[in-house]
């Protein structure tokens, strides 16, 4: 296994999100993030953005979680999340709280 030089690796950004919905659950949020990205970016945009909801960062009490995304697509992903108004017939709002290059700064 060869190590990839740091200059060739994909640069990632982490977006801290807050969900305003009484029924926000870990599995629901993961599907919600994927659906929002698909509607706004399409399949090709999703692949390039590398959107990933990190389920182990979900905080049930605060309804917050972290999404990993490519550094080039942060603004597009934030726009996609802001456009979500409902999911599975329930009103939902997603707020982007903070963006960071290190996941530990958001926890």
Image (tube, helix red, strand yellow):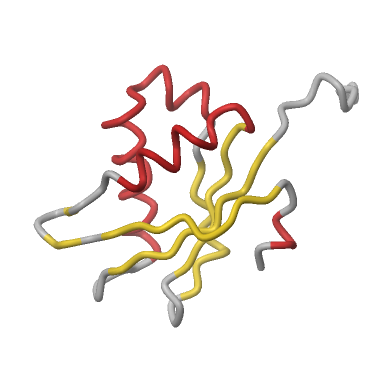
> Could you tell whether 99 is left or right of 89 in the image?
right
- Residue at horizontal 88%, vertical 27%? 6
Compared to residue 47, the image places residue 16 above or below, namely: below
How many numbered marks appear?
Answer: 0
Q: Quadrant of residue 27?
A: bottom left
Quadrant the N terminus occupies: top right
Q: Quadrant of residue 106?
A: bottom right
Residue occupying the far bottom of the picture: 61
How far across and how far down the image is residue 25, in percent? 34, 68
How far across and how far down the image is residue 94, in percent? 35, 57
- Residue at horizontal 32%, vertical 49%? 31
> Could you tell whether 45 is left or right of 107 in the image?
left
Compared to residue 102, the image places residue 3 above or below, namely: above
Compared to residue 38, the image places residue 19 above or below, namely: below
How far across and how far down the image is residue 37, in percent? 36, 35
Nearer to me, 68 or 79: 79
Nearer to me, 25 or 2: 25
How far across and how far down the image is residue 5, in percent? 90, 23
- Residue at horizontal 72%, vertical 27%? 10
> Could you tell whether 22 is left or right of 49 in the image?
left
Quadrant the C terminus occupies: bottom right
Compared to residue 85, the image places residue 50 above or below, namely: above
């Amino acid at each position: 296994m060869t190590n990839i030089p740091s200059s060739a690796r994909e640069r990632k950004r982490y977006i801290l999100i807050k969900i305003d919905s009484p029924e926000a659950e870990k599995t629901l949020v993961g599907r919600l993030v994927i659906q929002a990205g698909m509607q706004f970016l399409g399949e090709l945009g999703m692949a390039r953005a590398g959107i990933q909801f990190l389920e182990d960062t979900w905080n049930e009490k605060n309804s917050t979680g972290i999404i990993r995304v490519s550094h080039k697509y942060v603004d597009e992903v934030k726009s996609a999340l802001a456009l979500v108004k409902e999911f599975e017939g329930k009103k939902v709002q997603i707020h982007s709280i903070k963006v960071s290059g290190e996941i530990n700064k958001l926890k």
